[in-house]
Image (cartoon, rainbow, N blue to C red):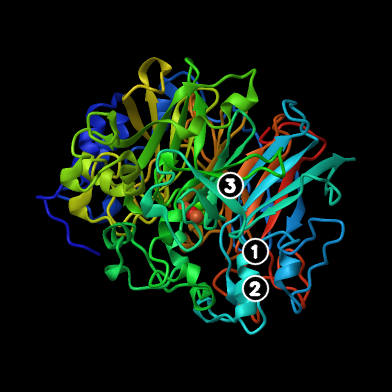
Amino acid sequence: MADSSNKSPCFEKVLESYLNRRAFIRSGAAAAVAAVSGCAKDGAALEGASLTKTKAEAKKSGTTPGVGSSLSFNELAHGLDKNFAVAEGYDHQVLISWGDALFADAPEFDAQRQSEASQLQQFGYNNDFIAFVPLPYGSKRSDRGLLVVNHEYTSPSMMFPGSPSAADVSLEQAQIEIAAHGLSIIEIKKQAGQWHVDKTSSYNRRITPQTPMIISGAASASSRLQTLISKDGIHTLGTYGNCAGGLTPWGTILTAEENVDAYFHGDIKHQPEAENYQRFVSRTGVKAWANYFPRWNLDKNPNELLHVGWVVEIDPYDPGSKPKKRTSLGRFKHEGCNVYINADKHVVAYSGDDQAFEYIYKFVSKNKYDEHNRQANLDLLDEGSLYVARFDASGKLHWLPLTYGQGPLTEKNGFSSQADVLIDARKAGDLVGATPMDRPEDVDVNPVNGRVYAMLTNNSRRKHDQLDAANPRAHNANGQIIEFWPEGGDHTKTEFNWDLMLLAGKPGEVATSYHADISENGWLSCPDNCAFDQLGNLWIATDGAEKSGIADGVWATEVNGPNRALTKRFLRTPIGAELCGPFFTPDDENFFVSVQHPGGGSSFDKPTTRWPDFDSAVPPRPSVLVITKQGGGRVGS
Ligand code: FEO
Ligand code: CA
Ligand code: CA
């Protein structure tokens, strides 16, 4: 553990400045600050009392916490075992798993006899983001629609007999891996309370790293995007590293390319794009694909890594449509991307860059959304302004423009066009003075209160002398949730307010901030993805809670009023898995979740769980589940 000294802006000082502008949480925290002299290591001496509203304060506000909550489900206990578990009174159905057939003539899954051809017709690996879009387009149906699912990455040691390492797979295995990436689009229907995949649907589609795509937006056709597979910097192939994403109000899907560097080989220090690749923290040599395909070898195809790290827009209602990489949203390790229609109809898209000390971005469209003309909305994300966030200790958030020619974004610093600013978005963010965050994951807008919530998952590398008001803990293993909003609700504004909604972790072990009444099962660690129900409740999915001894899963909380930050555990993943992609149907009665990498950290040959099949011939399979309330009703009630 790093030494702390009174000279650094340690947790207590950061906390004090935070408290100075937040009277409502003053008493509990001030007492905690007073109790320690100098700097506590990692805030540990604060014993979780820090920012938590006390029971007395809750009482003073006139309402009893928990009573009258819209989240009245019986909380699930912590635990860690081979199974999936959900709160009492709820059913879970495994809707689809890795290898399940997507088409009427697709082969059934056989773990011992996998092939590229079969995988191309089957559900991919490691499902992450999920969106449900009703059929037909424009309806609010909750019993028929398309499920769009990201397949973020592959784990050869869990997929193939013999448990090969990622860097060591055969050509055939690499081809299967490639085919298991990208996305699946499937039509699903609910009949007699059960969901089914319609394998005969003409909407069903696999999108892979080989699917033809267009590079659109302000970086399209940049000479820096010319590669072995793209002479013009416009046409490209495929998407991979698809982590989270978003659904647009015009019914398209945004899929976010995140850890795309892992696919490449080559000496990044000696590439024409060396500066970009180093700033991108490119961890080459992880995967074996480049052994077989020069496309992923930077020594042979030096600019290919610039074709990924984008947000890709896909129209699930048009199975023949070409996905488009929306470069105007910037290139970084996008966790996800969520859009909000401002009152004046400009489209605002929020996205986090998931790496330690990276930034939060927003894009504001030049043109306006037209709810009566779907076609007119399809390219709204190509033109507009990109901004990056600076969180000030005063509680103000400033959106700093990433516009070529403005401020430091000029030739002097190596930018000769907006394309350069977008391709080098991280460097542009450095130059304008953005706030380095604790790994921004999902950033999403609450449909009820219009505020934006960012999941900051953790940052073990943050040191005591790197603390700031928005990232107040060193060696942050647990993450926090930050909330920000424009005064008056205009999301195109460049000045917002912000607040910390909660500091995650186990109370008593680290400095945390929750509602004082959370139960022993209510604490969480490593928030990653999120969803809102129609009441505006926040549903938080985690990735990394197992390091604290509890299974990952989903917790729910109200965001306003006396039950704010009263997180309650709703479900648990099987051992080794993270939970992602939470998504509600329009009626809030069906809750889709992704269980990613069950048995993670073990191997095909000796898995720690065989969920969900529990068949000795079948390894654990990443799966999408749907959760419903027994007897029907809103999930959470
Ligand atoms: Fe793919 Fe940020 O998790
Ligand atoms: Ca994620
Ligand atoms: Ca994750």
Label 2 sits on a secondary structure element that is helix
Q: Do the residues under discs 2 and 1 have CB atoms within 8 angstroms?
A: yes
Report the residue marked by disc 1. Answer: 180
Q: Is residue 471 left or right of residue 517?
A: left
Q: Which mark is residue 505?
A: none
Q: Which mark is residue 554?
A: 3
- Residue depth check, mark 2 versus mark 1: number of the one nearer the observer: 1
Label 3 sits on a secondary structure element that is strand
Q: Residue at x 59, y 76 (%)?
A: 157
Q: Is residue 333 above or below residue 114?
A: above
Counting residues from the N terminus, which is met first, the one under dot 2 or under dot 1? 2
Q: Residue at x 21, y 63 (%)?
A: 2
Q: Locate the C terminus by quadrant.
A: top right
* Amino acid type, callout 1: Ala
How far across and how far down the image is residue 119, in percent? 72, 66
Counting residues from the N terminus, which is met first, the one under dot 3 or under dot 2? 2
Classed neighbour count for the residue bearing mark 1: other residues with Cα under 10 Å, few (<14), some (14–19), many (≥20): many
Label 1 sits on a secondary structure element that is loop
Some atom of ligand 1 lies within 8 Å of the CB belonging to the residue at label 2: no
Extreme residue in the bottom direction: 162
Report the residue marked by disc 2. Answer: 159
- Residue depth check, mark 3 versus mark 2: number of the one nearer the observer: 2
Kindly indicate the quadrant of the structure image that contains residue 619.
Answer: bottom right
How far across and how far down the image is residue 162, in percent? 63, 85
Closer to the camera in the image, 264 or 24:
264
Q: Is residue 187 visible?
A: yes
Q: Locate the N terminus by quadrant.
A: bottom left
